[in-house]
Image (cartoon, rainbow, N blue to C red):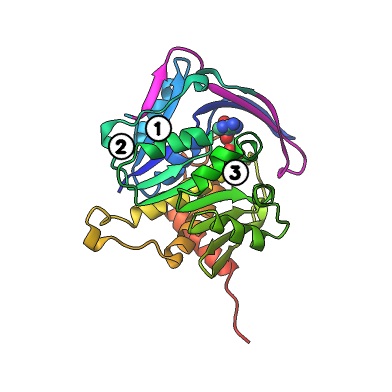
Amino acid sequence: MSLLVLGSIALDTVKTPLEERADLLGGSASYASLAASFFSPVQLVGIVGEDFPQENITLFRKNRIDLEGLQVVPGKTFRWSGEYLWDMNQRETRSVELNVFENFSPELPESYRSARMILLGNIAPALQNHVLDQLTRPHFVIADTMDLWINVAKEELVRLIARVDMLILNDGEARELTGETSLIKAGRRIREMGPSFVAIKKGEHGCLLFGENQFFSCPAYPLEDIHDPTGAGDCFAGGLAGYLASRQLDALDPSKKQEISFELLRQAVVEGSVIASFNVESFSMDRLRTVTSADIAERYGIFRTLSRFEGL
Ligand code: AMP
């Protein structure tokens, strides 16, 4: 089953304490689509300008990412620039150029409207709601967001949260959204806003998954060298959603539709964490270009070992 992915497609400039790189392929939809493509085909919804390098289009195509929903319009691609401090968990945005994003209003191609598994990647919540409005029978909708939207578009975001099955956000955002300092209380409060499931990411400290009276704490992979943390959150969301899509092969036949259980989501959260851990090993999507299924399976096994311990 295909996964529909909405989000930003960007050309990023990233500065870390050791290196600076410009014009990198970035954006929430780019990271999420490539991450998801390890598990399922993707239908990508986004916009780029005429300056968007052809090699990026080729990369998408090579990885079974369908581009019927990609608009290429006159003008410049969205640009973002960020700088990481010595503590690579801390990032400052240096500049944002909306460019073609300014007038983006995604209209889904006919063939995308019946999508069943959806990832509304990080982008303005009004656009996430607009895409949701066009879907005829979504089965499972996941939304990702960021602090910016809590600050500038909270009402629209709250409207979106009420409509989705799962929300993904990081610890600071969960605290900001709910006004709770405890992440456990924040997870519960967000579930009360609508979604059956909530994943709260804690950067290099793993992630918490909340369901109805269910809770899972996913460890973080102990990476020694992080080269570029950009897109880790998007890869987490994309890997998770792509894995779920791969397990919903029969969802078109309602009698065979597999329920999205908490057990399946636990696996999906680990798969998302595995892909995110690979992604930060290199700038942009460089590492994801070379990762193999065997690499993913091996690291999944390491995640299992990390969180297993004997009973008393
Ligand atoms: P992350 O590291 O998961 O926060 O994602 C980083 C990516 O988000 C970068 O590649 C940026 O191009 C993209 N990005 C930054 N700001 C925005 C924004 N306001 N809307 C959509 N995407 C953004």
Label 1 sits on residue: 45
Q: Quadrant of residue 283?
A: top right
Q: Which of the 4 image quadrants contains residue 180?
A: bottom right
The three-letter amino acid code for the residue at tag 2 is Tyr
* Mark with earlier residue (2, 1): 1
Q: Spatial distance from mark 2 to mark 1, Cα to Cα?
A: 9 Å
Q: Nearer the viewer, mark 1 or mark 3?
A: 1
Between residues 309 and 212, which one lies in front from this camera angle? 212
Q: Secondary structure at mark 1?
A: strand
For the C terminus, the image quarter is bottom right
Q: What residue is at 49 percent from the left and 60 percent from the top? A: 300
Q: Residues within 10 Å of mark 1 (few under 14, many from 20)?
A: many
**Structural distance between the alpha carbons of marks 3 and 2:** 31 Å
**Horizontal relation, residue 192 to residue 203: left or right:** left
Q: Quadrant of ligand 1?
A: top right
| Circle nearer the viewer, 3 or 2 | 2
Q: Which residues are magenta?
A: 69-95
Badge 2 vs badge 1, beta-carbon distance below 8 Å: yes
What's under tag 1, amino acid-wise?
A: Val
Q: Please, what is the three-letter code of the amino acid marked with disc 3? A: Val
According to the picture, the residue beneath numbered tag 3 turns out to be 280
Callout 2 secondary element:
helix
Q: Of the residues under marks 1 and 3, which one precedes in the sequence? A: 1
Residue 306, picture quadrant: bottom right
Task: Evaluate whether residue 220 shows in this view.
Answer: no
Q: Residues within 10 Å of mark 3 (few under 14, many from 20)?
A: many
Q: Which residue is mark 2?
A: 112
